Amino acid sequence: MAKNLLLIFTRNPKLGRVKTRLAKSIGTVPALHIYQFLLEHTKSITQASTFDKAVYYSEEIEENDIWEPTSYQKYVQIGTHLGARMDIAFKNAFAKGYSKVVVIGSDLLDLQEIHLTEAFEQLNSHDTVIGPAKDGGYYLLGCKNHIPNIFRNKNWGSTSVYEETLKDLEGLSVHLLEPLNDIDVFEDIKDIKLFDKFYK
């Protein structure tokens, strides 16, 4: 078993259930197509990597989708909020013997394989790694140990999550990745020509 595990948190791609804030501007069908495109991007930057990979679905495991079971472990997220779900996923990963665990979402066009490689490499000399999102959250979090308090007492989805997480990590060594932009609202994609075909 590889010592490194990448957790990919994803929503089941169902109409009206993904990219809901974006859908308010462009409609539910274009929003779903954009999310499916972002899922394919996430797969493309992870499938050739040597670390183990686990997809955590929001609702149910899908058997015949883009995540081949030969390359991706499959689980369902458990917990009443995002923090609890990540907490349980990290706890289970370390219980299985992994020594470095990194979590990402599945909707970042700017995320590349080099960011994942850097995260695992930096965990050789740091306790944690964080990739700040430009909206005040984070797009990546990596740890060498289970740190439950970083998943508690947060207003998930707010602009304060990143700063609050840093406060929880005081006393530990933290490596910061470059800030990236995630895709939540129309302003996040309006200047990206790649997405024009989905809603124009």
Image: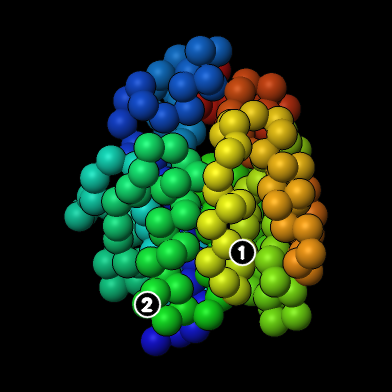
Where's the C terminus, which quadrant?
top right
The amino acid beneath tag 2 is Lys
Res. 175 visible in picture: no
Identify the residue at image location x=68%, y=66%: 128
Residue at far left of view: 63
Quick one: label 1, few (<14), some, or many (20+) residues within 10 Å? many
Nearest to N terminus: mark 2 or mark 1 = 2
The residue lying toward the viewer, choosing from 57 and 160, is 160
Identify the residue at image location x=71%, y=31%: 159
Circle 1 — which element?
Answer: strand
x and y, in percent, of residue 199 in the image = 52, 20
Residue at far bottom of view: 1
The residue lying toward the viewer, choosing from 61 and 49, is 61
The residue pinned by badge 1 equals: 142
The residue lying toward the viewer, choosing from 46 and 79, is 79
Identify the residue at image location x=57%, y=62%: 147
Report which quarter residue 27 is drawn in: top left
x and y, in percent, of residue 26 in the image = 52, 15
The residue pinned by badge 2 equals: 96
Give the number of the disc on residue 2.
none
The amino acid beneath tag 1 is Gly
